[in-house]
Amino acid sequence: TTTTIMSRVLTNLRVCAHTRARSHRGHGAAASSSMTRNSPRRRSAKQQSKIVIERQLSTARASSVTDAHASTSFDDDEIELVASETSTSLSAGRKPWKDGEWLRGDARQVAELEASVVAPVNALEPKMLALSDEELRMKTDEFRARLKNGETLDDILVEAFAVVREASRRELGLRHFDVQLIGGALLHRGWVAEMRTGEGKTLVATLPAYLNALEGKGVHVVTVNDYLAERDATEMGRIHRFLGVTVGVIQSAMDSIDRQLAYACDITYVTNTEVGFDYLRDNMAMDAEELVVLTRPFNFAIVDEVDSVLIDEGRNPLLITGSGGVSDEDRYVAASKVAQQLKPGRDYKVILKEKTAELTEEGMELAERILKVKDLWDTREPWGKYILLAVKAKALFIKDVDYIVRDGQVIIVDPSTGRVQMNRRWNDNLHQAVEAKEGVEIQGENSIIASISYQCLFKLYQKLSGMTGTASTESEEFFSTYELRVARVPTNKPNLRVDAPTALFLTAEARWYAVADFIESCHYDGRPVLVGTTSVENSERLSAILDNYLWTTPDGRKMRGIPHELLNARPQYAAREANIIAQAGRQYAVTIATNMAGRGAGT
C-alpha cells in the first residue's frame, strides 16, 4: 500500500541521513580529518551509504490506500533497491524504435511514423540528390500549387520533408537523421515530441515549419529568449530562404513597423514573452494600422522547451500596467521610520518562507505611541496597512538579494537567476514601501490595463505543438489543459551516458556536503564539473562550502578550498558570464551556476 511503501522509504532515508551525518559531523575549519580526500575504500562506503530510491511510486498510488493506522512493520529485505540506467541501451545498427521498450504506449505512434514517413523520405533521397539548386527551390512553388488544387499538407508531407532534408545538407551540411524525421512528423500532427538533449530539436523544427508555411498562414517558432530566436532565425533560416520561404525574427528592441514585417513572414522566430505582449498591445490598439501580430489569425506554433512555457509558466499572467499618482507618500515615509524602531520577535513576527509578517500587541502599542494615534486600524486614519508594509519591506525584502538600487530606482532581482527584472514592480503597494525604506522617489502603484496567461495565449493557435527533453512527466497535464499528446522519440544512436539514480537525503546539509564530496573526487581526477542549482541562495551556499573544503591533492599536499567559478548572474558576474561558460569544460574546472545562468551566452 501507499502508506506502507512510504514508511519503508522514509526508514531507508533515515539510515542514509544518519550515515551522512556521521561522515560530515564536524565539517569546517576544525574538521580537517573529515574533509581530506577519501581513500578508495572510504569512497566506496560512502556510495553504499546513499540509499537510492529507484522504484517509482506510481504503482503505489494506483493501488488501494489502506487505513491511516495501517501497520508499517517490515523486513529490511522487503524493498528491492536496484540501481539501473534510465537510458535505453540499443545495439549498434538496430532501429531504436524496434526495441521492446519502444513498442509500448506512445511508441506505437513512433513505429507507425517509421513506416509512413521515414521509409518513403529515404526512398526519395536519391531523386532529391539529383536535383539542381534551382530545381530544388522550385519544389516550393510546386507544393503551393498542389495545395491550391485541393491537396492537403499530409499529402505532400513526405516530399516536403525530403526537400528540407536535402536543402539542409546543401546549406548547413546537416542531414536530418531518421529519428529527426519522426520528431518533425509528430510536431506537424500537433504532438509534443520528447527528444533528449543533443538530439537536434532546433533542426527538427525546420521540417514542420517549412511544411506548414506553404499554406501562407504563418508559422511561429517560439523560443525562450531573444538570443535563441535570433540564432535560430539566422542559422535555420538559411534552409527556408534557400527554398524561397520568408523568415522573420522578433527582438525586444524592435519598433512596431519592424514587428509587422517580421510577423508577415512565412515563418517567424519569436519568444513566448514577445508574442504575448504583442497580442496584448494589439488588443489595446485603436486603429487597424497599429496591429502587429493580429493582422492574421494565430495559425501554427512550435514551442521549444514546451514544458517550461506551457506548464511551469502556463498560469503566470503577462501584464501591461499603467502607473498612477501617489497621494500618500508621507505615510510610506513615516511608516518606514516607525518600522526601523520595531524589534523582531517582540514587536512583529515574520515567516520568511511565506513572505508574511504580523504585528504583535506590543508592536501595535509602540507604533501608536510613536505616531501619537489611538488606533492603528482607525478607518479615518488607517496607519496599520502602512506599518505592516514597512515591516515587510524591512524584514522580508533585502537589498542586493531581492532587489538592487540603481539610478534612484528599486529594481527587482529574480530569485531563481539573480538577473535584474527591469520595469517590474511588486504589487499591493509593496514596491512603494521598499522605495520609502531606501529613500528614493516613491512612484505610483501600477494598475493593470491588459493581461493574459500563456495558457490562454497558446490556446488561440489553430494547431499547437512543442518539443523538449522532459515532457513525459507532464503528459497528463499537457492533455488535460491543451489536448496535446506526448511521444518519446528514441535517440539516433545508443546513449553512452550513464544516468545515475537519484540520491535522497533527509537534510539539505547532508545533501550539499555529499555534492561537495563528489565535486572533490571529480576535481582530483581532473574532470570538469558543472553544478546546476535552483536558486542564487543555493549556489552561494555551495560556493561557501567549497571555499572551506579541506582536501589532499594528487601530489600529497593538503589544500583548503576547491577552486571554482560562481555564476548566478548577479551584476558582478554578468560581465564575465560568457567567459565563465566558455572555460567551464576545461580540465579541473568547477562551475556552479543557477538553472538559467549562461543561457544565451553565445559560446
Image: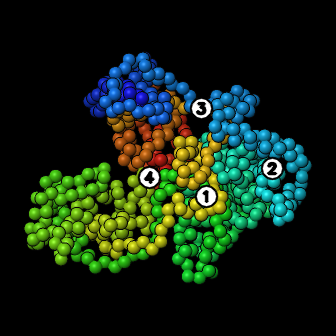
Q: What residue type is labelled 4?
A: Thr
Residue appearing at x 86%, y 56% in the figure: 136
**CA–CA distance between discs 4 and 2?**
43 Å
**Which badge, 3 or 4, is on the more N-terminal residue?**
3
Q: In this view, does 593 lie above or below 229?
A: above
Q: Do the residues labelled 3 and 4 touch (CB within 8 Å)?
A: no
Residue appearing at x 64%, y 43% in the figure: 487
Estimate the x, y position of residue 13 in percent, counting from the top left: 37, 28
Estimate the x, y position of residue 256 in percent, counting from the top left: 60, 75
Which of the 4 image quadrants contains residue 329?
bottom left
SS for callout 2: helix
Where is mark 3, residue-wise? Answer: 87
**Which badge, 1 or 4, is on the more N-terminal residue?**
1
Q: Do the residues labelled 1 and 4 touch (CB within 8 Å)?
A: no
**Residue lying farthest bottom?**
287
Q: Is residue 137 visible?
A: no
Q: What residue type is labelled 3?
A: Ser
Q: Horizontal placement of 91 versus 539: left or right?
A: right
**Which badge, 1 or 3, is on the more N-terminal residue?**
3
